[in-house]
Structures are given as structure tokens and as C-alpha cells.
Image (cartoon, rainbow, N blue to C red):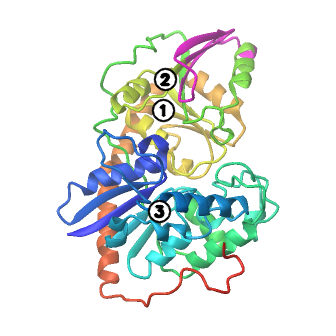
Amino acid sequence: MNKVALISRGGGHAGGASRVADDLYFSLVKKTTFEARRFIGETIELGGDIPYQPIIEKNIKLYRSLKKRATRRGYVDHFPFEIIGLNAEIRRADIVHAHDISSVFSPRMLEQLSLRRTVVWTLHDMSPFTGGCIYPLGCNHWLDECGTCPQLREWPLTTKKDRTSTLVKSRRRILAQDRLHLIAPSEWIRSQLQRVLPGASATIIYNGVDTKAFHPDGERHFMVPADPSMLTLLFVANMVNDVRKGGLYQHEIRSLLAVRGKKLRLVIVGGARPAGVKQDGPLTTIFAGRIQDRSELASIYRSVDAALIPSHADNFPLVILEAMACGTPILAFDTGGISEQVDSDCGMICQPGDIKGLMDFGIDAFERGQLPGMGRSAREKTERSFSLDLFETSHEAFYQQLLRKEAGRKAPATAIYDQNDPDRP
């Protein structure tokens, strides 16, 4: 039985990319051809459905000290310090599959592992081929060789020193070797990769959603009672005020409602604010808090008329798939791979920043009774194109193809970095 090590920053609570890794773990443990193990870099909480293991299992204090010192000098995730304490189960895996690894695993460690193991890296964001930022957010330096980074001191580039030109050269050198096997969850992220590495290849495997857990039939959430008199929208984000997720539009929405003489309910899932209701003129905001339970989250999706996704930077968000699976139409900005998820039959996409366009469409479609039909189309598209079954079989076929291709491949052990490397710690 082939062993697969699934690596990510954290468990499912850490965000969509880590949840994708969890979904893949659950699918693999049902197979007789693969033995899956889950490894995370964040603190492991006991209990739960997945037996998470730490990426670093020994020399933890030394590892953290070296990583902190390198980060302070600007070399964020640059040196493969993981070598001093890497979990032995990762070393023994036939396939090492990295997901979101910013701040917990060096790309150069993946390179080292690829000398003896089959290594897969899913491009959940742009950090594998930028100087470290998750998304450039309007900065074009990444198209060349980075430098003068506007995101210093912001996660994951939590440093004052700008070494992004060194970081980006190292990451692109690794990818250019074609030793790592890349998965792109969207055509968009693959196109961004190929803007800077035209010869790079990545296999498209869309994220999937459990259509049995997320479905249109079921009860509404107790915090969102039915109200046919006004449009009810849902906004979901781990960090509600994250500018990438567009969490700063409540003022604009309230102003638009006042101009049109309409009322609206906005349900917000995520953030640190406790559950409750806030009335602000024509806008009623229902704060549902953080929700991890899938059945409760599904009841939220079923309780709203549409999901509002005003993201300024995203790839192939799970929240859209979950909402669509529950028969919820989508109102979104045309960001990343969102246009590959949402079409005119199941929602509306506008240019980033056009919150008025989304709100006008949503209000008009609600008043015309068009949203339920869009919700049914959204569910059908999810079943057809984004099911968890398709996600599972695509990964299994990809793994089998790689194992056949690399059977018997051997490579001599090499130093993780040259002794004369000027960027050595």
C-alpha cells in the first residue's frame, strides 16, 4: 500500500486550503491502494476526526529558533530547517503532497524530498511563485523579480528586511526543475504561474464539495428566520475584515440601500465578534460567529437568498462550492478562478469593486423571483462539475500516474544548499 503524507499549515479550521487537504485525507483513508497521514505545522488539538501529526517532531526549539532568526533577516521560509526534525513518517511516504505551507514548510525542503520521493504541490495561492506573498494585491513586482515589497510585516512576510528578490528566484528555480508535480485548482492560477514560468506544467483538479453534507433540503438556521419581505445575503470569511475577502463594503451597501429605498439582511459568518444582531438603518446585520460544524454551516447557506463573495484576491473558494451545493446563488466579483465556478445560470459576477452592480442585480433578481431558479442551477452544476467523488477520483488517478512514471527513479543525495551559498543562515 502506497503511503501519502498530506502537509498543510493547519487543520480544517485554518482555511479553505487546509480543508481541501482534510477532504483528500478522508477520501484516501477509504482506499485500499493508499495509506494517508495528515501533518500540520500549527498546534495540534487532541480529539476530532483526523489524527493530525506534527510536521516537526524533534529538535523543535532549535527549529523555531533558526526559523525565527532567518525570518528576522528577511529569509522567510527560505532555508529547509525542517531537515533537523522532520517527522519520520513524512520521510517514509511514497508521495508527499503539500498544500498551503506558508510559514510552516520551506519549498527547498520539498525540493530535497523530491530527490527520493514523489512530491506534489497544490497551488492554493500564488506564494509558490512570488516572493512569498499569498496574492500581490495590485503589485506587479512579482512579474519580474520582486523587491520593494509592499506587504512586508504582513503575514506570511513578517519581517522588516526585504529579501523577496532572493526568495522568488529560489522558488522559481525549484519549480523550473520540473521535479515537483503541480496541481492547479483553477485555470486562472495555472495561467498566473505560466506568466512567469512559461514552460511550467500543472494539472487542473478542481476543488470538490461533499454534496451529501451540503444540500438544499433541510432546516433553516435558527438565527435567520424566514423573511420574504427583504433580500438576505451571506458573507463568509475566516477574517471578516480581510481586504482580500472584500469585508469592507458594509458602509457602501448601507448607502446603496438608502438610495434605492430598500432593506436587506446581511448574515456574517466568521470573525471574532460574538453572535448577535445589529440594526443600522435599512441594513440588518446578523453576526453568526465562527461555525465549524458542516451541518450548521449548511443550514446557514439554506437560510439565505444568495451568497455575497466580494473577494479582491482568491483562487477557487470552497465557500462558493458549499453555497452552490446548498442551492444558494452567488453574487461575486470576477476574481481568480471564480468565473470558472459561477456562470449566469447560477449567479452574477461583476468587476472587482463594483459592489453596486452586485447589489442592484441581487435586489432586482430577488424581487423578480429569479434567485430560486439560479439556486437550482447552482446545485446541478456542483453535482456535475465539483463533486467530492470527482475530486477524489482525479487525485487517485493523478497519484497512480505519477507512481507509474517515477517507478525506479533514483537520484543521488545532495546537500540542501551549497556550502558557498551566500544566503546560508
Give SS at disc 3: loop
- The residue labelled by disc 2 is 305
Q: Are marks 2 and 1 in contact (CB under 8 Å)?
A: yes
- The residue labelled by disc 1 is 329
The type of residue carrying mark 1 is Pro
**Left or right of residue 47, residue 13 in this image:** right
The residue positioned farthest toward the right in the image shown: 148
Name the residue located 44 percent from the left edge and 75 percent from the top edge: 113
Quarter occupied by the C terminus = bottom right
Where residue 146 appears, as percent x and y from the top left, is: 76, 66
Whole-Å distance between the Cαs marked 3 and 1? 49 Å
The type of residue carrying mark 3 is Asn
The residue positioned farthest toward the left in the image shown: 32
The type of residue carrying mark 2 is Asp
Among numbered discs 2 and 1, the one appearing first in the sequence: 2
The residues colored magenta run 259-286
Label 3 or label 1, whichever lies nearer to me, is: 3
